[in-house]
Image: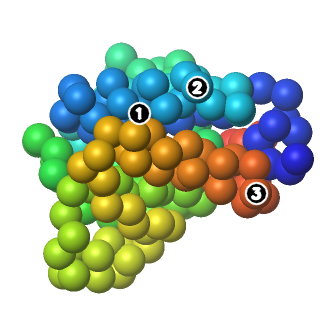
């Protein structure tokens, strides 16, 4: 295999999601994964940006290998978080996958204009939700070749 598994460490996920049910399902999907992983969960956009920029209380936060981002968040919505991530030279290479309930064409277009790496609509069916999360993980962490975090943090 290629990707994160070659690095000999768990894959670092950042889930930015305020729905406890979706957080629980994502944890379940990643727990049953074939790739070792570690999941950090934040419930609003401001906390996500503080985490990514290692501001207090997140000074020792790991750099995520992938960000799973909901669009509809309190305090700072996912579009603004995405915009800030992709405008930041230190963060823009981290793949961002929007996982949202919105199927609105304007949301899809807007997030791709903001340089999202992937837009996924949350399935309503619980089993399908878990399969989608596992498919995202498989694609981004075993198929896609990502830059080494060591190189990115120099």
Q: Quadrant of residue 78?
A: bottom left
Circles 3 and 1 in contact, beta carbons < 8 Å: no
Q: Secondary structure at mark 3?
A: helix
Q: CA distance from mark 1 to mark 2?
A: 10 Å
Residue 121 occupies quadrant = bottom left
Q: Looking at the image, which residue sits at the far left? A: 75
* Left or right of 58, for residue 36: right
Which dot, 2 or 3, sits closer to the camera? 2
Q: Secondary structure at mark 1?
A: helix
Tag shown at residue 26 = 1
Q: Which numbered disc, 1 or 2, marks the residue closer to the eye?
A: 2
Label 2 vs 3, first from the N-terminus: 2
Residue 134 in the figure: left or right of residue 129:
right
Residues at marks 1 and 2 touching, judged by CB atoms closer than 8 Å? no
User: Of label 1 and label 2, which has the lower sequence position?
Assistant: 1
Q: CA distance from mark 2 to mark 3?
A: 18 Å
In the rendered image, residue 47, in percent from the top left (x then y), is placed at: 28, 32
Residue 53, given in percent of the width and then of the height, sits at 44, 38
Question: In the rendered image, which residue does mark 2 sit on?
Answer: 32
Residue at coordinates 47% horizontally, 50% vertically from top-left? Answer: 132
Residue 87 visible (yes or no):
no
Q: Is residue 47 left or right of residue 75?
A: right
Return the mark for residue 143.
3
Q: Which mark is residue 5?
A: none
Indicate the secondary structure of the residue bearing disc 2. loop
Placement of the C terminus among the 4 image quadrants: top right
């Amino acid at each position: 295999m290629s990707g994160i598994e070659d690095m000999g460490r768990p894959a670092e996920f950042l889930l930015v999601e305020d729905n406890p049910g979706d957080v629980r399902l994502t944890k379940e999907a990643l727990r049953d994964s074939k790739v070792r992983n570690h999941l950090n969960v934040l419930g609003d956009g401001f906390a996500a940006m503080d985490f990514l920029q290692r501001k207090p209380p997140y000074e020792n936060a790991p750099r995520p290998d992938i960000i799973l981002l909901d669009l509809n968040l309190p305090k700072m919505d996912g579009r603004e978080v995405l915009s800030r991530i992709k405008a930041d030279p230190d963060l823009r290479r981290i793949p961002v996958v929007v996982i949202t309930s919105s199927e609105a064409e304007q949301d899809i277009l807007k997030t791709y204009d903001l340089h999202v790496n992937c837009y996924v609509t949350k399935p309503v069916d619980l089993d399908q939700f878990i399969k989608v999360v596992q498919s995202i993980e498989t694609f981004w962490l075993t198929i896609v070749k990502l830059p080494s975090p060591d190189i990115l943090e120099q």
